[in-house]
Image (cartoon, rainbow, N blue to C red):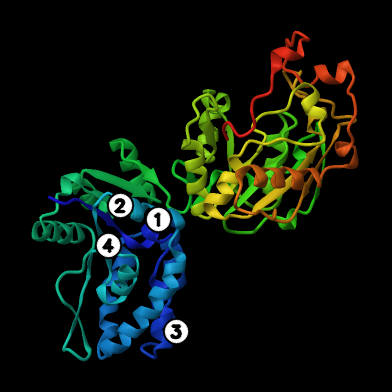
Amino acid sequence: MPSAAIFDLDRTLLTGSSAPTFHKHLVAAGLTDSRSIPGQRAYEKSYDLFGENPVVMQLARLFVRTSKGWPVAAVATAAEAAADELMNEVPGFARRLLDEHRAAGRLLVLATTSPAAFVTPFAERLGFDHVVATRWSDDGVRYTGELDGEFLWNRAKCDAVVRLAEAEQISLARSYAYSDSTYDVPLLKAVGTPVAVNPDPQLAAIALLNGWPIRHLDVSPGVAKVAGRELQEWLRPFNRPELVPNARFEFSGVENIPKTGAAILVFNHRSYFDSTAVTLLTGRAERSARFLGKKEVFDAPIIGRLGALFGGIRVDRGTGSTEPLDKAIAALEGGEMVAMAPQGTIPRGPAFFDPVLKARWGAARLAHATKAPVIPVGLWGTEKVWPRSARLPNLDIIDPPTVTLTVGGPVKLGYRSLERDSERIMGAIVDLLPGEARERRTPSEEELVRTYPPGYSGDPTAEADRRPGSDT
């Protein structure tokens, strides 16, 4: 028996409600006017924030009466136009999830309370195999203002999906269901793999009690959201340079970071303090970022868990696994920004002072796979805040060091050679650094020692560099 992936529409497959879009195109088609019923905007806002409730759904149930006399053909035209617009509102991770289910051989089912007349063109564009939706009665030319069957909400929606499964011999025990609403619990319980997507508070509690996965299809899997916003957004008011007293910060070129869409933010690696500095930069750009970081950070009990909730990507360089790159590619395809240090690790010894920066090929691989713009950041001074030789950062708040972050325009890549494009990426970063970074000189022994971890024996041969390109 085939299995299926069953998706709710509003606040699940879409991040918000489809109703305003449908209403706009009904107005454009001359089927209704632009006036709102009293309290309509408040209802829409309540729905966006908290999901379905009996009051909102009663209004939806009564909406069919307004359709009396509407030409079926005119509604179809409005629905086609609305579908074109709604396609732009489907999050990238929702598209990816649909592709994964389709590749696994599962049937795609859209199950929604919305009228079938509205949602069918949209479902067809996304390649759904079946639509389970509320149907309006018509005489072949015009709608009668009555329902054709049940209003598919709560238990009625579940029953309609069960009838479809019986007719198409779909195994619900092997199927998946995705919804945001506590009123879809009957449907979620009817399948083998229920998933709460952007859940309302009641469904979130039910999902936690039952061990159901919780997802948000507008962000990478595992990223936590509270009241519709991810943690990086909630903490952005506190992500301010003045709240870091042991360093002064100078930012330039922040406008080069794209406001939306996929981007690969690359920076040179000089200190344990780099991630703090770049986080301040992304906060100033008002963008969330998925940082690639060492496994040691993500394996730490508290910091590691927070890193995962923020969408960080764990990298275990010893395994040679492509999983970190696969996750980063998925994030970029979903329209997110990925931040990484192409060098992979902080250079040690003489390599730290080399004006030619060497990189592994991870950033170039991401760019080749996604064609996302690579945005270079020249980072300078972080080693004065937290040198590698120190177990803790410098806490001088009287005369703190200055850290500069300079953002350049997108790197021009050839997309033919990973090695050559890695050189282009690092060359673009070097061009953003101060002049002293491009001067070849012999560092003092004291300077060299600061580039090694605590306990360094003084034997540079014990700290051999790894081959660039060996991992991310």
Of residue 441 and residue 117, the one placed in the foreground of this image is 441
Residue assigned mark 4: 110
Answer whether labels 3 and 2 touch (C-beta < 8 Å).
no
Q: Say few, some or many: other residues with alpha carbon within 10 Å of mark 3 (under 14 / 14 to 19 / 20 or more).
A: few
Answer whether labels 3 and 1 touch (C-beta < 8 Å).
no
Question: Is 167 situated left or right of 46 in this image?
Answer: left
Of residue 134 and residue 55, the one placed in the foreground of this image is 134
Q: Secondary structure at mark 3?
A: loop
Answer whether labels 1 and 4 touch (C-beta < 8 Å).
no
Residue 143: where, in percent of width, then height? 22, 86
Q: Which quadrant would the C terminus be assigned to in this image?
A: top right
Disc 1 marks a residue whose amino acid type is Ala
| Sequence-wise first label, 3 or 1 | 3
Residue 94 is marked as: 1
| Sequence-wise first label, 1 or 2 | 1
Cα distance in 3D space between marks 1 and 4: 13 Å
Disc 2 marks a residue whose amino acid type is Ala
| Sequence-wise first label, 1 or 4 | 1
Total tally of numbered discs in the picture = 4
State which mark lies toward you, 3 or 2: 2
Name which residue lies at 71% across and 28% down: 346
Residue 459: where, in percent of width, then height? 76, 10
Cα distance in 3D space between marks 4 and 2: 17 Å
Image height of 152 relative to 304, above or below: below
Disc 3 marks a residue whose amino acid type is Arg
Of residue 96 and residue 276, the one placed in the foreground of this image is 96
Residue assigned mark 3: 35
| Sequence-wise first label, 3 or 2 | 3
Residue 103 is marked as: 2
Q: Secondary structure at mark 2?
A: helix
